[in-house]
Amino acid sequence: MVDHLANTEINSQRIAAVENCFGASGQPLAVPGRVLLGEGILTKECRKKPKPRIFFLFNDILVYGSIVINKRKYNSQHIIPLEDVTLETLPDTLQMKNRWMIKTSKKSFVVSAASLTERKEWISHLEECIRHLLTKTGRQPSTEHAAPWIPDKATDICMRCTQTKFSTLTRRHHCRKCGFVVCADCSRQRFLMPRLSPKPLRVCNLCYRQLLAEKKKEVEADCRQPEPIRSAIPGYEPSSGDDSDKSDDDKADQWPADTEFYSSEVSWSSFHS
């Protein structure tokens, strides 16, 4: 499919249409050899509540963003290199069905499709692209993944001390290491995790002690071997811990599932050929 669509006019038009929908807030997506393979709406489990997000699958990256106006304008663009992606199928819950997790070294999150068939299609195409990229680069599948954030509504009390009850005055916080919902007293520490951010991040007390112990072992080992050079993909900013809860995001929840959002009459998920 990639060879068939590469360097074709229809592929260039599709990528240009995506760039236009994100406008100046998005990054350029047209590069030599890049092919847009599919697109569609998936429900992303965000911190506050599940929200519809537009996803675009390219042969080397996965792009997603918030839906703003009439399914023709998007913002909050996120770009994920596929060679860093690992997938995990998840069981259904009462609220969400056809779920799976997209895991990367910088961010992991859960999405759900409108049907089981749609989930199978997304996972199949994603895995095919990932296999092709890893074969091409000779890299091994990623084994280090960021912990997904547990949604705020999953608990009314701190998941560490189990004593503090959350309210409008007592805020919820998330540990960047384990993803647990914790209170301020249980997450006063900050720790530098370069894989996630160049700045020290909030961690819970338990993770802080574990990270300190790991750091101490590294120092004691006094490993003098040079660190391996990690391939960096230029131009991609790491995603934030969670999508913003802007008011315009909530408008997306009002669109019915069969609403056409793209000039080519693509609804929900569609994979190109």
Image (cartoon, helix red, strand yellow):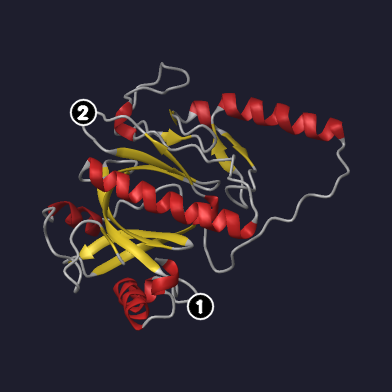
SS label for mark 2:
loop
Q: Which of 270 and 79 is in front in this view?
A: 270
Q: Quadrant of the N terminus?
A: bottom left
Q: Decide if residue 214 is on the left or right side of residue 71.
A: right
**Residue 83 horizontal/vertical position (percent):** 54, 54
Q: Are marks 2 and 1 in contact (CB under 8 Å)?
A: no
Q: In this view, does 210 lie above or below 219?
A: above
- Which residue is found at the position 47% from the left and 18% from the top? 161
Residue placed under numbered mark 2 in the picture: 94
- Give the quadrant of residue 149: top left
Calculate the distance from the C-alpha at mark 2 to the C-alpha at mark 1: 44 Å
- Which residue is found at the position 76% from the left and 51% from the top? 228
Q: In this view, does 236 lie above or below 217?
A: below
**Residue 251 horizontal/vertical position (percent):** 17, 57
Foreground: disc 2 or disc 1: 1
Q: Which of 169 and 221 is in front in this view?
A: 221
Residue type, numbered disc 1: Pro
**Residue 176 horizontal/vertical position (percent):** 52, 38
Q: Decide if residue 224 is on the left or right side of residue 61.
A: right
- Give the quadrant of residue 68: bottom left
Residue placed under numbered mark 1 in the picture: 32
Q: Is residue 21 visible?
A: yes
- Which residue is found at the position 47% from the left and 34% from the top? 179
Q: Decide if residue 140 is on the left or right side of residue 266.
A: right
Q: Nearer the viewer, residue 34 or 159?
A: 34
Q: Quadrant of the C terminus?
A: bottom left
SS label for mark 1:
loop
